[in-house]
């Protein structure tokens, strides 16, 4: 029997560090899951990933204790249910901009009477144990994304929805809707105030505040009080890491660099 | 019409830096190919990669100027031909331990009368241009691996085979067959002498010396005279990179690290 | 030209026995389709199956006379249309809880003027014959799931929607919404009354009553009047079958059993 | 940096000829993309194609200058965003029957403040260049399908939505909703009047008129003023082409033809 | 129970027309198999196709009466056995250049005592019937390629091997080994004499002569006496067909053609 | 750090019960691996399975303690090395008919100096632990198939090869080469004598005797002294299990059975 260890970390007021998976491969998922993250999230929204990739990726992750999550491409009960049936211990739901949308996200994650999730946890039974049904409503994590100006304005109503376990801020989308360039961080007050507002609402409603980013921003976010924090993504590790490796070696070749994509 | 730019680099006595692909994904291949490597190699020997992955990976690479190579799982003309037909500009053939095996590797890469390659360059035509056949024998790169004690002993007879364009040393296998632990580098004379012997034979026969490794060893190898040098692999970028990112952030969480795989 | 033989079975007041497919494999689909079922259903809701698996699974089924159906993950015309275009002879639509939802399900299955299905039966033409369009509205089967307390309460309005060919009861979800544990059967009157109510409504509106289950419950369901009945699923045949095989042999090994998942 | 060359063609009042992709294969996509079409469209509505196929198909296309488009299975921002993030230069949105639906399609294609597209152009960055975000709202093409009687009736309100770049008529669905057999062309005034009405509305609102068809109808459509015109599809090239090849040869075998599917 | 209809065609001195499959897709395979060919061959040598593609492709073909064959990438019993177990009714073995190699090809196709094929016809049982084993040695077709100068020189010894059912000439490889450009046909006596020699040897040993080509060469080959003749390939139908369609339409656009790959 | 528990079972003179995987699916593999088998074997010889399926199947198995093995399609070091690198704890090598072939099988499984295995245990490191290399030669299991008359005749020389850990008898192929019908068991002395001979040789050389079969034959085999025994296969569980379920229910339908494949 496996438990969703995110709940234990958060119960002890700890912070959970995560890895982001956008490459549709169970092998890269397995490598990332072994790196020591508390959680990894299979990104079906912006990653090049569909449900047909999710299942083997979850299998690759399942030989570790890292908690598998899935970001769904939309707030819709069909795809949320599929991800949970496949053995994700929780979902990250993008673009939740209102109390109603938060209610829908929660309902899709819970069996009746708390919600409308349909029964059939085929792989979840194998992953979590055949007592899954009796524990699922208590263990499955529902994480809603607050990533627009309007969502920040309404963050109070969103985090007050029972069953919202955590909020995940998307700084890039938040930036764009605030009129800034998409980036993991900004110094502009309009941006930092928004983060503060989310943190404050989470604190008052005992909802875990989370946020996307990288290993640099993660240090800052932990200090700010975020407790569900992205540290690295597969695509950036590959693209930026390869670029740094080449920068280290290229000057010794006497030839010029080929490109500078990253 | 595309040319195999490795030939131009080598003709100008330049060094070609490479990335190694072991994750069976066209998306990670495309990311790696954009990082600025001179070449990337799809590893069908030790990578989790089969021909069914090779084709989309080559397609992912083909939107860049990076030269695509394939390491075949064995020295056999069927699989060598398939990789070339799919649009690899060359193959790296493992475990070439004799002149006879080098002759076989070369023959598999060349159309008659230089070799026995069977005609049917389906995707190579689309990748390289429909004049592919007329150029293939001159452009396709045949790289043989010298990676055992016995191969080093016979390196002279191997590099003297006409059509062997480059040698690729596998330090890990070389280490093992020399009685050392598998590693990208060793200070033991038995190891360094072997590299010297390969470099010397290559120099005298005008064959390009190449070697596997990482961004640290690459600097050293370039100084030693290797001109076809691995700088990074997708699996190490992910595994080691994620570990470093976590090391950077974890101490700030107050919790202990989960694992230390890498 | 192929016909949907479910219609002939039902026209003769016969009962159609089915197999359930949750493993994303065209090989297991082909094996199941050869076993003698009247129909098999590719489960895209709770099975580990996406559209990318559905197409090869339908191809594996198509060398038999077994009728291929698909359970869609949600009541939405895009995915219903895709399944039918791929050659499913009908869809099972989950969580139909109202007359309006039944109307939407039917509309998605029929070309104008009876519905809003978009034209483009690419594989259906190859499967059913190039006169498919002229027959499709008459042959494609629209099966709606009645699987919640609320749906049973409204079963009359659901089955009275023209074009609803059959109802498929999901006993597990029905149990959960009735406050019972998810199971294929219960003796509680609240459960048995619900089945009676569905059967009665179907009889009066000449809609075929169907239900999920296994080979034990199937015998009972046929006696109760259900005429579209699940007999076995791939996952249970594997999991339970392997467990029984081991139980038969294990005591002879002197060692203890490893697990008892099922 | 790549640009969406459809915009340049249309800016010069030129016509863009396209190929249609329904076979879920990156190899057939690459072959089609090399044939000289101005654009190819990966059909996720009626093609046997899911997002998991789209990504490698786009990679196969990306080694050419042919503009890649995707037809989404439904007018929903989640799937539209995924296709654009994967590197499609535009989407064709089916069954747009009202101004409201056109507004939704446009919004899904544009970042704030013009729309609601979520940020995360993973592969689009690699395909189009890392300045993608700054150019995306101006370059991504939003093409709405006018393919029902009701849509033709409302074509004026549809094409007047800012951000609708082109209209794509689906003659088969239009035929069906007009009470005709599904076909690429009809002589009936009810059909030809509908095309005229679309052409006229497009002209007045400076929206590009487009239409599905084949190489015969394409000639006629160009004369009529359509400037975004399907010329061929992979499935028809295979099915009809193979049939014609056999017709040419079969009489010489003395045996009778096996079938006449197409 | 299905029979290998090639044997019936040949027993009646008929000619069998074939389609060639190089695109790794079960959908294109199904379309091609419905076109009316007597046989289709899945090309695992020069096609972009591996065993993982072969199985679904055979499933796509199996809903038709077209005989499925596989060209293996090499003359090796492991892969030949896998193709036959998957339900291919025969194999085409490339580069058979001697009596010994022909003996090996035949042995790989036959169960003891005629050969060394290993037992385990998993999918063949479903495709051909559960009496497959009793019929396999008599029905499975072993076709060896004579496609080099040396093979033509030794054609007599090759076709005299018991169990060689047919010879398949590869004109492109034959051309290359004869010093000509790779092409489906040549007028040079060195080429035409080679074909005559193969035809003559086949006639005297009652082995079916076959040859690759297209719909133009097929007419000529039938007249020459070949009875197992390629008429079309998927890749050429797509590439050439799309090019012709564009040639037909492009001049009406006022713009110039983009490319001329084919 | 994981150990190969087969070694512990055998060291205690226990018997290991196994499941056979022929369906190319990681989901069916995961279900089978959870059923309680001591080992499961991914069959790349007669299963519809290639290396591209092996890797995800091994990932599906890896969340259990069941030992993963692979049957390779041929006795060749390239494919044996790939399976071990992917994390199989051992290989079953078919058609080992001589001491030389047994030596080759063993060499392919061991690093120097005991063998010729090439270094690069990419996924094995993640599966078994990063000390894999130091333990691999001692833990990886090399199992050779004795499945022909000639192999039984030479069984003494085969089992005496150092490094052969177990023998696996293939009763079907053995039957065929003995002139019997392929079957898991026979009463003919020619067959029973062969089994006795293998058992006797194994006993004298302390090699584990193993054999294919089903849950009925397994009981008998354990009594005979076999200690590595197949109990069930995925394909038979599906095909036979579905048939039995239908037999149980069909008579109650009033309709006749559709087929009797199994």
Image (cartoon, coloured by chain):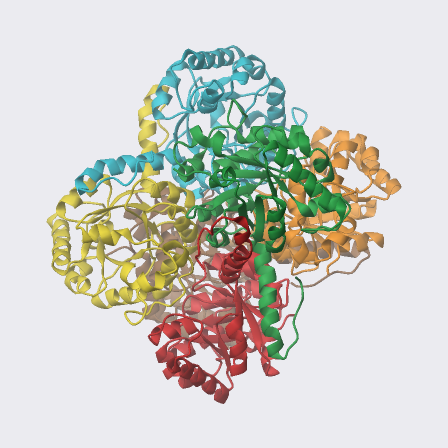
Chain colours: A red, B green, C brown, D yellow, E cyan, F orange
**Residue at x 50%, y 30% (from the top left corner):** E3
Asked if one can make out residue D131 in the rendered structure from this viewpoint, the answer is: yes
Q: Is residue E52 above or below residue A114?
A: above
Q: In this view, does E5 lie above or below B249?
A: above
Q: Position of residue B198 (x, y in %)?
A: 67, 39
Is C95 or C118 nearer to us in this picture? C118
Q: In this view, does D202 lie above or below F193?
A: below
Count the marks: how many? Answer: 0
Q: Position of residue A179 (x, y in %)?
A: 33, 75
Q: Quarter of the image for the N terminus of chain C: give it.
A: top left
Q: Where is residue E72 in the image (x, y as percent from the top left)?
A: 54, 32
Q: Quadrant location of residue C113?
A: bottom left
Q: Where is residue D207 in the image (x, y as percent from the top left)?
A: 18, 58
Q: Quadrant location of residue E79?
A: top right
In this image, E99 relative to F148: left or right? left
Q: Is residue D78 above or below residue B117?
A: below
**Residue at x 80%, y 37% (from the top left corner):** F195
In this image, D43 relative to C244: left or right? left
Is A77 or E139 nearer to us in this picture? A77
């Amino acid at each position: 029997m496996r438990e969703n260890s995110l709940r234990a970390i958060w119960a002890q007021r700890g912070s959970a560090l995560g890895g982001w998976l956008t490459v549709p491969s169970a092998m890269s998922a397995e490598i990332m899951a072994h790196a020591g993250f508390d959680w990894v999230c299979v990104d079906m929204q912006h990653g090049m990933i569909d449900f047909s990739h999710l299942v083997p990726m979850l299998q690759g992750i399942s030989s570790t204790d890292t908690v598998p999550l899935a970001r769904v491409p939309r707030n819709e009960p069909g795809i949320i249910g599929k991800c949970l049936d496949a053995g994700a211990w929780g979902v990250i739901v993008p673009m939740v901009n209102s109390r109603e949308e938060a209610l829908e996200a929660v309902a899709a994650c819970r069996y009746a009477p708390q919600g409308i999730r349909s029964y059939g946890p085929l792989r979840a039974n194998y992953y979590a144990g055949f007592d899954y049904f009796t524990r699922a409503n208590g263990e499955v994590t529902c994480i809603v994304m607050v990533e627009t100006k309007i969502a920040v304005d309404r963050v109070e109503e969103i985090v007050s929805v029972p069953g919202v376990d955590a909020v995940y801020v998307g700084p890039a989308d938040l930036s764009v809707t605030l009129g800034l360039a998409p980036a993991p961080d900004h110094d502009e007050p309009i941006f930092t105030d928004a983060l503060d507002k989310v943190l404050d609402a989470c604190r008052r409603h005992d909802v875990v505040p989370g946020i996307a980013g990288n290993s640099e921003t993660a240090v800052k976010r932990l200090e700010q009080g975020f407790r569900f924090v992205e540290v690295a993504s597969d695509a950036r590790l590959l693209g930026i890491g390869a670029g740094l490796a080449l920068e280290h070696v290229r000057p010794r070749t006497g030839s010029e660099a080929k490109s500078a994509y990253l």
